[in-house]
Image (tube, helix red, strand yellow):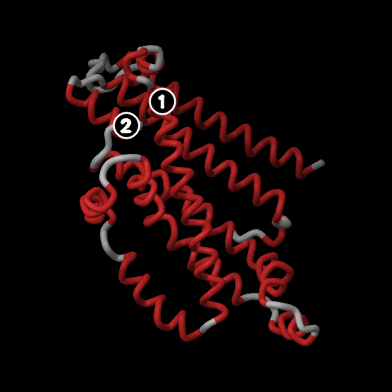
Amino acid sequence: METSESKLKQYSLGVLAHLLLLLAWYLFVRLGDVPKFVMPSPGDTLRALFVPDYGWWANTAVTATEIFGGYAMALAVGVLLALLFTWSKTLESLMLPLLVTLNMIPKVALGPLIIVWFKYGVFPNAMMAFSIAVFPILLTTARGLREVEPDLLDLVRSLRGSRWQLFTKIQLPGALPYVFAGMKVAAILAVAGAIVGEFLGSDRGLGYLMLQVQVTLDTPAMFMAVILITLLGMLLYGLVLLLEHWLVPKDARVS
């Protein structure tokens, strides 16, 4: 009962914090007599959502595809590379320093190259999201796979278990807390990556729309685009938390 009350209190405080932020936004604009082109009121921002010329739902769908697509690729590649590194120390010693070096390259600098290689569209922006999100998943998953008890691994090997059985029955369940720790970080980075890609070169999406309305100083539309991007990020992060709640015991989760 105390646990349920604690969770309810935690969620209530989170909702309250958002409501206070909304109130502070409204009071700042109204009491400070702030011009709309500098900062619109919450009402002005909401009204921008009903302007049909902006194609909100189509652009939101494009950005969502880039974020979720890039994130899915990062999850698959990150876990696969981590698994290969645990199977081969030679491969890890060869590839990990190279991946660290590549990760040091500013992703904004990669944007023009990705456009040259893949042109405009959803896939280049998904690749930008992938390039930012894959590294934390790789590192945390590799660490989690190494944390598995060696005695358990030896037991499965002594029973002539295959590498796939070793991975699915022992390594992956034991590494899940670390995998989800990386997934939560990657969820935030994937959103940033997709939007950076749209800023650098795109003809669709919420980031592209922000650049278009910036020219006319349509600040309410810019604010609404930011809110929709934030909601997409919250949706992705919430799905990760939900999966973690289902698959990882509470006392085993990595904060």
Distance CA(mark 2)–CA(mark 1): 8 Å
Which is nearer the eye, 177 or 80?
A: 80
- Residue 145: x and y, percent? 60, 73
Numbered label attached to residue 204: 2
In the image, residue 135 above or below residue 8: below
| Residue at 56% in and 72% down | 83
Q: Residues within 10 Å of mark 2 (few under 14, many from 20)?
A: some
Numbered label attached to residue 67: none
Which is nearer the eye, 81 or 180?
A: 81
In the image, residue 119 above or below residue 40: below
| Residue at 63% in and 75% down | 147
Residue under numbered circle 1: 58
| Residue at 33% in and 19% down | 54
- The answer to the question of whether label 2 and label 1 lie on touching residues, with beta carbons closer than 8 A, is yes
Is 148 displayed left or right of 231 in the figure?
right
- Tell me the element at label 1: helix
User: Tag 1: residue type?
Assistant: Ala
- Residue 244: x and y, percent? 65, 51
Tell which circle, 2 or 1, labels the residue nearer the N-terminal end.
1
Q: Residues within 10 Å of mark 1 (few under 14, many from 20)?
A: few
In the image, residue 181 above or below residue 125: below
Q: Quadrant of the N terminus?
A: top right
- Residue 8: x and y, percent? 69, 35
- Residue 214: x and y, percent? 21, 26
Q: Quadrant of the C terminus?
A: bottom right
Which is nearer the eye, 15 or 121?
A: 121
User: Tag 2: residue type?
Assistant: Arg
